[in-house]
Amino acid sequence: MPTDQANTWASVALLSPVPDTPQQVEVDADVLAKASALDALRVVGGNALYGRVTISGAKNAALPLLCAAILTRDPVQFTNVPVGLADIKTLSALLISFGVTVGLRSDGVAILRADNIKSTSASYDLVRKMRASILTLGPILAREGHAEVSLPGGCAIGTRPVDIHLGGFEKMGAKISIENGYIKASAPNGLHGAKVELPFPSVGATENIMMAATLAKGKTTIQNAAREPEIVALANCLNSMGAAISGQGTDTISIQGVEQLHGASFEVIPDRIEAGTFMLAVAMTGGKIILEKADIEPLESLVTLLQEAGVSVEEENGFVVVSRDPAKPLKGTDIMTAPFPEFPTDLQAQYMAMLALCEGAGMVTETVFENRFMHVPELNRMGANIRIQGNSAIVRGVEKLSGANVMATDLRASVALVLAGLVADGETTVNRIYHLDRGYENLVDKFRNLGAEVERVKGQ
Ligand code: EPZ
């Protein structure tokens, strides 16, 4: 490691002092969880938002990318990693438990090296904290020929099984069994290429199977593949490591297996969900914000809706400028979430918070997860008028929301409550904000820099 970089490693102020070179970093995700289990956000509504906000690297791109480092013995470097997220820290802890060297730096640089895998088992204790841990199964199985990963279990938004992941690995020759809550996968002679047809364009299953297929013998085709930008980023990174992948971004991805992969350096794409969250925030509060390091391309479905609602969205020399005159009423439109490029399920709760203030009524239909309306009762406690009918919610616009004590239940529901608090009369306290820590880097600072009255309240 060149001396200049060696010195900067020492300056890392993440979970624990990082040694001069990216060695084992004791990543104690528990410390983080304890630190914020009882913390809350206090929001005082009424301020329009003005100013600039820098969008972080995408959580849902960074997580599979870090897992891809398992596929080579060489060091892999990532930049623009949202190192402040709890999920990144939890995954780092899991990778370290496999024997991967993980170096995280506060400027978003991450260097990983899997030169020798000392364990192929992902413990329940870590997997239960973050279901994306399942994305280590494919790489470990492809690299070591066997893997034991705890079943991730459900979460607030649904049961979220992993049958599509496992079906793909079986097609590629792996033997899969479920014992004592663990997935035991083995392919002693290595995986072989296969034609895998996904029953649903699962993002995680597409990523897991694609990673495993890079080292399989022969060609794998994934049909009905997910088309999210995070899939394209992962495929492009794997190709920079020597993989032979084509079709990423379409519903058919082909992977020609290769002997081995080598190191690379790759920049994490901007977080389209964080960008969309800030665009909806200023749509609700009024004002004008400039998003830096945001990519508007993958947000077409949201931009169309916002423009129909009376919000201005412009791209000006690399920045995204979003504004709304607070005096102008908001007009809502029905939405239905669906896999990319349709409206993203991860923006459904935030859009519903805006819809609660639009003239007339609108319908929100959630087709991706079976229980992603946990924010509805909380929004109703703030004076919204929302009624759930099956996988749809009828939202009747109200004049005003009123501040209240509300409970966060999952990452995106949490931020929807913060958005509602930004416009509500009086004070809103959003409890259990450890959900927010998982997916939004420096959220309080970012909102405060835009003029919002938000502060983190330490739990008793
Ligand atoms: C990814 O989750 C994202 N997480 C989610 O973001 C996102 O909501 C989701 O994709 C959909 O876009 C990460 O990328 C880390 P899926 P994933 O597999 O891969 C069912 C956030 O807020 N399914 O596309 O788990 C599943 O139950 C998170 O950042 C199976 O039935 O999503 C769900 O109903 C939340 N069997 C649907 O498919 C399987 O084997 C979509 O799941 C896999 C999935």
Image: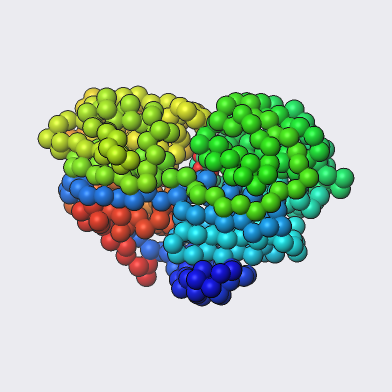
Residue name at image x 54 percent, y 50 percent? 266
Q: Where is 50 relative to 229, above or below?
A: below
Q: Where is 364 relative to 129, above or below?
A: above
Residue situated in front as seen by the camera: 52 or 122: 52
Residue name at image x 73 percent, y 39 percent? 213
Residue 238 picture location, percent across and down: 63, 44
Residue name at image x 64 percent, y 31 percent? 246
Residue 256 seen in this snapshot: yes
Report the side of 435 relative to 422 (left or right).
right
Toward which corner of the image does residue 284 lie, by quadrant? top left
Count the marks.
0
Report the side of 411 relative to 69 (left or right).
left
Toward which corner of the image does residue 253 lie, by quadrant? top right
Residue 83 picture location, percent across and down: 48, 59
Residue 417 picture location, percent across and down: 33, 47
Q: Quadrant of the N terminus?
A: bottom right
Residue situated in front as seen by the camera: 115 or 100: 115
Q: Give the colour scheme shown.
A: rainbow
Farthest right residue in view: 189
Residue name at image x 20 percent, y 42 percent? 288
Residue 19 picture location, percent across and down: 56, 75
Residue 392 seen in this snapshot: no
Report the side of 409 relative to 282 (left or right).
right
Toward which corner of the image does residue 234 lie, by quadrant? top right
Farthest left residue in view: 327
Q: Quadrant of the C terminus?
A: bottom left
Instruction: State ligand 1's quadrant.
Output: top right
